[in-house]
Each structure stands twice: as C-alpha cells, then as structure tokens.
Amino acid sequence: MNIRLLLAIATPLFVASIFSSCDDDDDEDTAKLNSYQENKEYGEKFLMEKRAEEGITESASGLLIKVNTLNPTGIRPEDGDTIYAVVTGNKIENKQNEFRYDTIRTSMHGQVKALVEGVKYMTVGSDFDFYSPYYLAYGTIAYEGVSREPKMKVTVNPYSAVKFNVKLLGVKKLDK
C-alpha cells in the first residue's frame, strides 16, 4: 500500500481517537468532581472561616499559614535543599483526623505543593501550620496514609482540604 494513502487514512483516525479520549478524561474528571463535591465545598467553607482568624496569613496561591513558633536566626530552605522535619497531616473533610506523622529527610522536590511552598517561609527551629486547599494538597487523587495512634489506614479523598503541621528541624543546603 502506498505510504501516502496509508497516512491519509490513518492520521484523521488517530487524531480523532486522541480527541475522543480527551473528552473521556473530561467526563471522568467531571464525574469525579461531582462525587466529591461535598468534600470540595466543605474544604472551601473551612478555609474561608480559617482566613478570618487572627494570626492567619494567606499566600498568593491560597495557602493559609499560621506561625506557631518562629526562629528568627534559623536557616531558610531553598529549592533543591534537603529538609529534616516532623510533618503531621490532618484531613479536614467532616472532621480532622491525623493521617501522617513522620520525621522526614527529603528533598523539597516531589513533595505536596503546600509543603514545598510553606517550608520556604520557615527557618530551622520554626513550627508552622499550613491550611491547604485541595489543589495544593493531593488534588483530584486519593491519598492513603496511616494514623499514628491508633494505627489505622486513613484515606484523604480527592478535592479535600488538608492541614499540615511542620516542625523544621534542619536543612542541608544543595551543593552548588
């Protein structure tokens, strides 16, 4: 078969299949949002009320920040640095429920957007609370975690707002 003829037949079919699969993704996202609309609305209401509290600051991205302790002389982490921190997460939907308690040693790359952004405001020795809208937390996917006490599996549903408490213990600067 002539290659031009084959391309003339196959290309429109290929393009049509790509666009139809995009439509399917849009339909799937819409269905997922509808099933988790209550989480999204609850989180938005919670964050709106939290914004009005004294001591809460809002970043340009919508992250709400509460400074519990600030060490004015500590080192501030930057992109690429490795941080040492104690992180506790609480899901907001319908009730707060602790789902993670870790002493972490990790690069700031690849972490939840709320933590990557929030940690940059901190200095070593500081303790902050971050109240994150769903799009800075786990977004449209579910997160499976384990509560500290009692040990049990906890799921943070899609479109859920999340509270993180971070105690920044140390920073290892990126070798440049």
Image: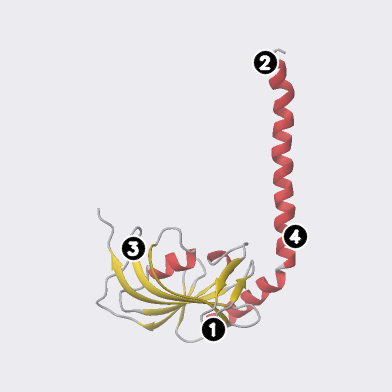
Colour scheme of the rendered structure: secondary structure
Question: What amino acid does circle 2 point to?
Answer: Ile
In the rendered structure, find residue 136 and report the number of the disc placed on it: none
Question: What amino acid does circle 3 point to?
Answer: Thr
Q: Residues within 10 Å of mark 1 (few under 14, many from 20)?
A: few
Find the distance from the CA under tag 2 to the CA under tag 3.
53 Å
Q: Mark 2 points at which residue?
A: 3
Q: Residues within 10 Å of mark 3 (few under 14, many from 20)?
A: some
Q: Percent x, y for residue 96?
A: 58, 82
Question: What amino acid does circle 4 point to?
Answer: Ala
Does residue 95 lie above or below 78 as drawn? below
The residue at the point 74 percent across, 65 percent down is 34
Q: Is residue 167 visible?
A: yes
Q: Name the residue under label 3.
A: 82
Find the distance from the CA under tag 2 to the CA under tag 4.
41 Å
* In this picture, residue 106 sits left or right of residue 21: left
Q: Name the residue under label 1.
A: 52
In the rendered structure, are the residues bearing label 2 and label 4 in contact, judged by CB atoms less than 8 Å apart? Answer: no
Which of 98/5 is in front? 98
Find the distance from the CA under tag 1 to the CA under tag 2.
66 Å
Q: Percent x, y for residue 92?
A: 59, 78
Q: Mark 4 points at which residue?
A: 31
